[in-house]
Amino acid sequence: MRYLLLSLIAVMGCAPEPESQPAHPSEVIAHVVRTIATDSLNTDLRAGLPTVDIGMYLLETDSKRYRERMPLDEVIRRYRLAKDVFGGVGVQLNLLWIRTVSVNTEDLEIESNVMAGQPAGEITNLYEKSRQQRSTLSPEAEAMFEAIIEEDVANARTVYLVGMEDVIMNWYELQADGAWVVRSDPTNALSFPSYTLEERIPRRLRGVITVQNIFKSQKIIAHELGHKLINVSHEYRDISPAHEVDAEGGLMVYGEGTEIAAGAEGRWHLERLMRSPYLYRLEDGEKVYNPDYRESGHYADPIYGSLIMRD
Ligand SMILES: [Zn+2]
């Protein structure tokens, strides 16, 4: 049950030395084994509507753990649900391809991030906390994604769903005795969102989302796309952003709800989605993207204007 163990590293109220968090980059080489036809998943697309391009990479591996948790038919089923969720608010998902890739390592567990800033102290707002704590993409995650995601001029405007075996997330947690620790948890999927990483991820990799256990929820792909495209954490209507939220109704809380609510009472989720830099419209055959983030893509980036909540 090693995946349920938590490793706790006391940091005594200050940032740990980078060496104190595991990061073992090594050269990763990946190559595409096959491309799976996805045309049937795009037959409903219409020119002129807001659209997001998505590329999907699944692993070609003998790993029993990966194969059991990421079967293709279940991945496609949840991708279709994501299409319905976003289609329901007028945003089309365009699946460019599904490619299977093999990588030159059997070590398919990666750390997602390294904490580079200070524990948040008195700050309670999750997004302000996140800015201070400065989570940064881990070297080993970077090596893995650089190897898998093929170079393309539109890399920074494309979302990539990448199958992974295990992705460990690191975060600061305040203990009852007042000490801060870096806590490490396994994840079922991870969105590497701009509100957390800002520009501390190579620009061409900023669209990456990993999926480790497709069975975690029916809406797992839709929910992770929500982190990336709406650029919010777990929150819904009168529920303030938090690391984990069990609630029904909204796409961005746990539970099976899929609502993308509008207006201040909906925490501007729909309006924020519509400003995502990953959205484009086809005009005369050309993809015209929304304006890019003006600062780093943090929660209150100027592209959102007044579409932000302070609590
Ligand atoms: Zn989430």
Image (spheres, grey):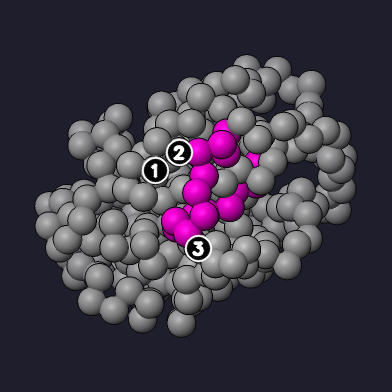
104 sits to left or right of 51? right
Whole-Å distance between the Cαs marked 2 and 3?
Answer: 17 Å
Disc 2 marks which residue?
83
Which residue is more in the foreground, 209 or 197? 209
Residue 301 lies, with reference to residue 28, above or below; the image says below
Residue drawn at the location 79% of the way across and 21% of the way down: 62
- Residue 96 seen in render: yes
Q: Amino acid at mark 2?
A: Lys
How many numbered marks have been drawn onto this rendered protein structure? 3
Name the front one of labels 2 and 3.
3
Which residues are drawn in magenta?
Answer: 41-58
**x%, y% of residue 172?**
41, 57
- The crowding category of the residue bearing disc 2, from other C-alpha atoms within 10 Å (few below 14, some 14 to 19, many at least 20), is some
Mark 1 vs mark 3: which is more N-terminal? 1
Distance from Cα at disc 2 to Cα at disc 1: 6 Å
Q: Is residue 55 magenta?
A: yes
Residue 191 at x, y = what percent?
50, 50
Q: Quadrant of the N terminus?
A: top right
**Tags 2 and 1 in contact by the CB under 8 Å rule?**
yes
Q: Residue at x 17, y 61 (%)?
A: 263
Label 3 element class: strand
Disc 3 marks a residue whose amino acid type is: Arg
Secondary element at tag 1: helix
Answer above or below: position of 1 versus 251. Answer: above
- Which residue is found at the position 36% from the left and 59% from the top? 273
Q: Give the residue pinned by disc 3.
A: 281
